[in-house]
Amino acid sequence: GQQVMQIPQYQHVQEGEDFTTYCNSSTTLSNIQWYKQRPGGHPVFLIQLVKSGEVKKQKRLTFQFGEAKKNSSLHITATQTTDVGTYFCAGRSMNYGGATNKLIFGTGTLLAVQP
Amino acid sequence: GAGVSQSPRYKVAKRGQDVALRCDPISGHVSLFWYQQALGQGPEFLTYFQNEAQLDKSGLPSDRFFAERPEGSVSTLKIQRTQQEDSAVYLCASSVSGINSYEQYFGPGTRLTVT
Protein backbone atom coordinates (compact mmCIF):
# COMPACT_ATOMS: atom_id res chain seq x y z
CA GLY A 1 0.00 0.00 0.00
CA GLN A 2 0.92 3.64 -0.14
CA GLN A 3 3.61 4.74 2.30
CA VAL A 4 4.77 8.20 3.28
CA MET A 5 8.11 8.47 5.03
CA GLN A 6 9.68 11.47 6.70
CA ILE A 7 13.24 12.18 7.70
CA PRO A 8 14.65 12.87 10.15
CA GLN A 9 12.54 11.25 12.87
CA TYR A 10 13.91 13.69 15.42
CA GLN A 11 15.82 16.97 15.24
CA HIS A 12 17.26 18.95 18.11
CA VAL A 13 18.35 22.51 17.29
CA GLN A 14 19.48 25.60 19.13
CA GLU A 15 17.05 28.49 18.95
CA GLY A 16 17.85 30.54 15.87
CA GLU A 17 19.11 27.60 13.80
CA ASP A 18 17.28 26.43 10.69
CA PHE A 19 15.34 23.18 10.40
CA THR A 20 14.18 21.05 7.48
CA THR A 21 12.03 17.94 7.30
CA TYR A 22 11.64 15.85 4.16
CA CYS A 23 8.65 13.82 3.09
CA ASN A 24 8.68 11.04 0.48
CA SER A 25 5.72 9.10 -0.90
CA SER A 26 5.85 5.71 -2.60
CA THR A 27 3.14 6.87 -5.01
CA THR A 28 2.29 10.05 -6.90
CA LEU A 29 0.18 12.42 -4.86
CA SER A 30 -2.68 14.64 -5.94
CA ASN A 31 -1.87 17.08 -3.17
CA ILE A 32 -0.03 17.23 0.10
CA GLN A 33 -0.84 18.87 3.40
CA TRP A 34 1.33 19.70 6.38
CA TYR A 35 0.20 19.53 9.99
CA LYS A 36 1.83 20.45 13.30
CA GLN A 37 1.12 18.56 16.50
CA ARG A 38 2.29 20.03 19.78
CA PRO A 39 3.17 17.59 22.57
CA GLY A 40 -0.10 16.29 24.02
CA GLY A 41 -2.11 18.09 21.37
CA HIS A 42 -3.85 17.28 18.12
CA PRO A 43 -2.73 17.90 14.54
CA VAL A 44 -3.30 21.44 13.30
CA PHE A 45 -3.38 22.22 9.59
CA LEU A 46 -0.55 24.40 8.27
CA ILE A 47 -0.81 24.41 4.50
CA GLN A 48 -1.75 22.50 1.34
CA LEU A 49 0.32 22.19 -1.85
CA VAL A 50 -1.30 21.08 -5.08
CA LYS A 51 0.84 21.94 -8.09
CA SER A 52 4.02 20.25 -9.21
CA GLY A 53 7.02 22.29 -8.05
CA GLU A 54 4.87 24.57 -5.92
CA VAL A 55 6.55 26.67 -3.21
CA LYS A 56 4.61 28.45 -0.47
CA LYS A 57 5.81 30.59 2.41
CA GLN A 58 4.26 31.38 5.76
CA LYS A 59 6.49 33.83 7.64
CA ARG A 60 9.53 31.71 8.61
CA LEU A 61 8.12 28.49 7.09
CA THR A 62 8.76 27.46 3.48
CA PHE A 63 6.95 24.51 1.93
CA GLN A 64 7.86 22.80 -1.34
CA PHE A 65 6.16 20.15 -3.46
CA GLY A 66 8.41 18.14 -5.75
CA GLU A 67 8.21 18.19 -9.52
CA ALA A 68 7.13 14.55 -9.60
CA LYS A 69 4.57 15.16 -6.83
CA LYS A 70 6.09 12.37 -4.74
CA ASN A 71 8.06 14.42 -2.25
CA SER A 72 7.80 17.57 -0.20
CA SER A 73 9.78 19.55 2.33
CA LEU A 74 9.21 22.02 5.14
CA HIS A 75 11.96 24.45 6.06
CA ILE A 76 11.87 26.67 9.13
CA THR A 77 14.24 29.62 9.23
CA ALA A 78 15.58 30.82 12.59
CA THR A 79 13.65 28.43 14.82
CA GLN A 80 11.92 29.65 17.95
CA THR A 81 10.83 27.71 21.03
CA THR A 82 7.23 28.03 19.83
CA ASP A 83 8.14 25.84 16.84
CA VAL A 84 8.49 22.79 19.10
CA GLY A 85 6.28 19.89 18.05
CA THR A 86 5.92 17.09 15.53
CA TYR A 87 5.52 18.04 11.89
CA PHE A 88 3.56 15.65 9.69
CA CYS A 89 3.09 15.65 5.97
CA ALA A 90 -0.10 14.02 4.74
CA GLY A 91 -0.69 13.07 1.15
CA ARG A 92 -3.66 12.19 -0.99
CA SER A 93 -2.86 9.61 -3.63
CA MET A 94 -4.17 9.53 -7.16
CA ASN A 95 -6.43 6.68 -8.14
CA TYR A 96 -8.32 5.70 -11.25
CA GLY A 97 -11.16 8.08 -10.56
CA GLY A 98 -8.94 10.97 -9.46
CA ALA A 99 -7.79 11.93 -6.01
CA THR A 100 -9.17 10.01 -3.06
CA ASN A 101 -10.38 11.66 0.10
CA LYS A 102 -8.07 9.54 2.25
CA LEU A 103 -5.05 11.28 3.77
CA ILE A 104 -1.97 9.16 4.41
CA PHE A 105 0.12 10.72 7.14
CA GLY A 106 3.87 10.57 7.18
CA THR A 107 5.88 9.22 10.06
CA GLY A 108 6.50 12.71 11.43
CA THR A 109 9.54 14.71 12.52
CA LEU A 110 9.78 15.75 16.14
CA LEU A 111 11.48 19.14 16.51
CA ALA A 112 13.05 20.14 19.80
CA VAL A 113 14.34 23.70 20.17
CA GLN A 114 16.79 24.58 22.92
CA PRO A 115 16.62 28.22 24.07
CA GLY B 1 -18.32 25.26 20.52
CA ALA B 2 -16.34 26.25 17.48
CA GLY B 3 -14.17 23.16 17.16
CA VAL B 4 -14.41 19.39 16.90
CA SER B 5 -15.16 17.76 20.23
CA GLN B 6 -14.65 14.18 21.30
CA SER B 7 -15.77 12.20 24.32
CA PRO B 8 -14.65 10.68 26.49
CA ARG B 9 -11.17 12.19 26.50
CA TYR B 10 -9.79 9.15 28.31
CA LYS B 11 -11.12 5.61 28.44
CA VAL B 12 -9.72 2.61 30.25
CA ALA B 13 -11.22 -0.71 29.22
CA LYS B 14 -10.53 -4.24 30.29
CA ARG B 15 -9.62 -6.58 27.49
CA GLY B 16 -12.79 -7.97 25.97
CA GLN B 17 -14.98 -4.99 26.80
CA ASP B 18 -16.82 -2.99 24.16
CA VAL B 19 -16.22 0.77 23.91
CA ALA B 20 -17.95 3.62 22.09
CA LEU B 21 -16.16 6.84 21.21
CA ARG B 22 -18.09 9.93 20.20
CA CYS B 23 -17.20 12.72 17.81
CA ASP B 24 -19.04 16.03 17.38
CA PRO B 25 -17.75 17.66 14.21
CA ILE B 26 -17.87 21.34 13.40
CA SER B 27 -21.46 22.24 12.57
CA GLY B 28 -22.16 22.03 8.85
CA HIS B 29 -19.02 20.08 7.98
CA VAL B 30 -19.80 17.47 5.35
CA SER B 31 -16.80 15.18 5.77
CA LEU B 32 -15.81 13.29 8.90
CA PHE B 33 -12.73 11.13 9.38
CA TRP B 34 -11.54 8.76 12.10
CA TYR B 35 -7.84 8.09 12.69
CA GLN B 36 -5.88 5.91 15.09
CA GLN B 37 -2.62 7.33 16.43
CA ALA B 38 -0.23 5.07 18.29
CA LEU B 39 2.40 6.63 20.53
CA GLY B 40 5.15 8.26 18.49
CA GLN B 41 3.42 7.56 15.17
CA GLY B 42 1.42 9.54 12.68
CA PRO B 43 -2.36 9.30 12.52
CA GLU B 44 -3.53 6.26 10.55
CA PHE B 45 -6.72 6.54 8.54
CA LEU B 46 -9.59 4.36 9.71
CA THR B 47 -12.73 5.51 7.92
CA TYR B 48 -14.42 8.41 6.15
CA PHE B 49 -18.00 9.71 5.99
CA GLN B 50 -19.54 12.18 3.62
CA ASN B 51 -22.70 13.25 5.41
CA GLU B 52 -24.24 9.97 6.63
CA ALA B 53 -22.63 7.80 3.97
CA GLN B 54 -19.55 5.82 4.91
CA LEU B 55 -17.55 6.09 1.70
CA ASP B 56 -14.31 4.49 2.79
CA LYS B 57 -13.70 2.04 5.62
CA SER B 58 -10.55 0.53 4.23
CA GLY B 59 -8.51 1.47 7.30
CA LEU B 60 -10.60 -0.32 9.89
CA PRO B 61 -8.20 -2.96 11.26
CA SER B 62 -10.76 -5.70 11.88
CA ASP B 63 -14.46 -6.44 11.98
CA ARG B 64 -14.36 -5.50 15.67
CA PHE B 65 -14.28 -1.87 14.58
CA PHE B 66 -17.50 -0.22 13.47
CA ALA B 67 -18.32 3.43 12.79
CA GLU B 68 -21.56 5.22 12.11
CA ARG B 69 -22.87 8.72 11.44
CA PRO B 70 -26.60 8.14 11.13
CA GLU B 71 -27.78 11.74 10.78
CA GLY B 72 -24.74 13.16 9.07
CA SER B 73 -23.44 15.01 12.11
CA VAL B 74 -22.33 13.18 15.28
CA SER B 75 -20.32 10.03 14.71
CA THR B 76 -19.55 7.05 16.93
CA LEU B 77 -16.63 4.67 16.63
CA LYS B 78 -17.34 1.38 18.34
CA ILE B 79 -14.73 -1.23 19.18
CA GLN B 80 -15.98 -4.63 20.23
CA ARG B 81 -14.03 -7.10 22.39
CA THR B 82 -11.14 -4.70 22.87
CA GLN B 83 -7.59 -6.03 22.67
CA GLN B 84 -4.38 -4.56 24.07
CA GLU B 85 -3.24 -3.61 20.57
CA ASP B 86 -6.27 -1.30 20.33
CA SER B 87 -4.63 1.03 22.88
CA ALA B 88 -4.06 4.33 21.07
CA VAL B 89 -5.42 7.83 20.66
CA TYR B 90 -8.46 7.92 18.40
CA LEU B 91 -8.72 11.19 16.52
CA CYS B 92 -11.75 12.53 14.73
CA ALA B 93 -11.48 15.22 12.08
CA SER B 94 -14.00 17.10 9.98
CA SER B 95 -13.78 19.20 6.86
CA VAL B 96 -16.19 21.62 5.33
CA SER B 97 -16.70 19.90 2.01
CA GLY B 98 -16.81 16.54 0.36
CA ILE B 99 -14.36 17.82 -2.20
CA ASN B 100 -10.96 16.31 -1.56
CA SER B 101 -8.92 19.43 -1.24
CA TYR B 102 -10.04 20.84 2.08
CA GLU B 103 -8.08 21.00 5.32
CA GLN B 104 -9.15 18.80 8.18
CA TYR B 105 -9.92 20.10 11.67
CA PHE B 106 -8.99 17.63 14.36
CA GLY B 107 -10.59 17.05 17.72
CA PRO B 108 -8.55 16.55 20.91
CA GLY B 109 -8.78 12.76 20.63
CA THR B 110 -9.81 9.95 22.94
CA ARG B 111 -6.96 8.09 24.61
CA LEU B 112 -7.97 4.45 24.91
CA THR B 113 -6.03 2.17 27.22
CA VAL B 114 -6.88 -1.52 27.20
CA THR B 115 -5.66 -3.42 30.26
Image (cartoon, coloured by chain):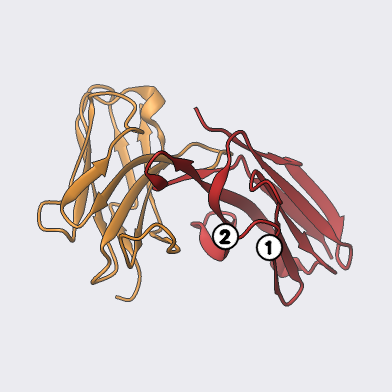
Chain colours: A red, B orange
Q: Quadrant of residue A6?
A: top right
- Crowding at dot 1, Cα within 10 Å, few <14 / some 14-19 / many 20+, comes out as some
- Crowding at dot 2, Cα within 10 Å, few <14 / some 14-19 / many 20+, comes out as some
Whole-percent x, y for residue B73 in the image:
18, 61
Is residue B43 among what the camera can see?
no
SS class of the residue under badge 1? loop
Q: Quadrant of residue B95?
A: bottom left
Q: Which residue is mark 2?
A: A50
- At x 79%, y 54%, the residue is A20
Give the chain letter at badge 2: A
What's the residue type where badge 2 is placed?
A: Val
Q: CA distance from mark 2 to mark 1?
A: 7 Å
SS class of the residue under badge 2? loop
Figure check: A111 above or below A97: below
- In the depicted view, which residue is nearer to us: B50 or A16? B50
Whole-percent x, y for residue B87 in the image:
40, 32
Q: Which residue is mark 1?
A: A54
Q: Left of A38 or right of it: where is B71?
A: left
Whole-percent x, y for residue A9 in the image:
72, 40
- At x 27%, y 67%, the residue is B29
Is residue B32 among what the camera can see?
yes
